[in-house]
Image (cartoon, helix red, strand yellow):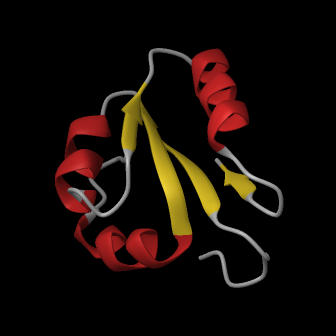
Amino acid sequence: LGADIDGKLVLIAGGDGKGAEFKDLHDPVAANCRAVILMGRDSDKIDEAIGDAVPLIRVGSLIEAVEQCRAIAEKGDAVLL
């Protein structure tokens, strides 16, 4: 997660995890992400797993998510959906 880029990741996450466990996200997100943009049904579960590792921003649509990414990302960063 993020090992092949010069900057950090801005992660767009959420939707329907179809029963997936998110507890293992904390450490890789803390190490590689600038922020996480949350949307969709499982956003609460992802929020709980990530905690305060990085800033979490909740949005209501993919358009809002992309707008937030544009505002947050810095040169060398990548956005991961």
Q: Determine if residue 41 is in view.
A: yes
Q: Quadrant of the N terminus?
A: bottom right
Residue 28 lies in quadrant: bottom left
Query: Which residue is located at x 66 percent, y 17 percent?
Result: 63
Which x, y percent locates residue 44?
21, 38
Instruction: Name the residue located 65 percent from the left edge and 75 percent from the top edge.
Output: 2
Question: Is 9 on the left or on the right of 25, as rendered?
Answer: right
Q: Position of residue 53 (x, y in %)?
A: 30, 64
Relative placement, left or right, of 18 versus 8 is left
Task: Specify the farthest residue to the bottom.
Answer: 3
> In front: 25, or 31?
31
Q: Is residue 24 above or below residue 39?
A: below
Residue 45: give x, y in percent of width and height: 21, 46
Question: How many tags in the picture?
Answer: 0
**Is residue 58 or residue 44 the one in the foreground?**
58
x and y, in percent, of residue 65 in the image? 59, 27
Give 72 or 12, whichever is nearer the viewer: 72
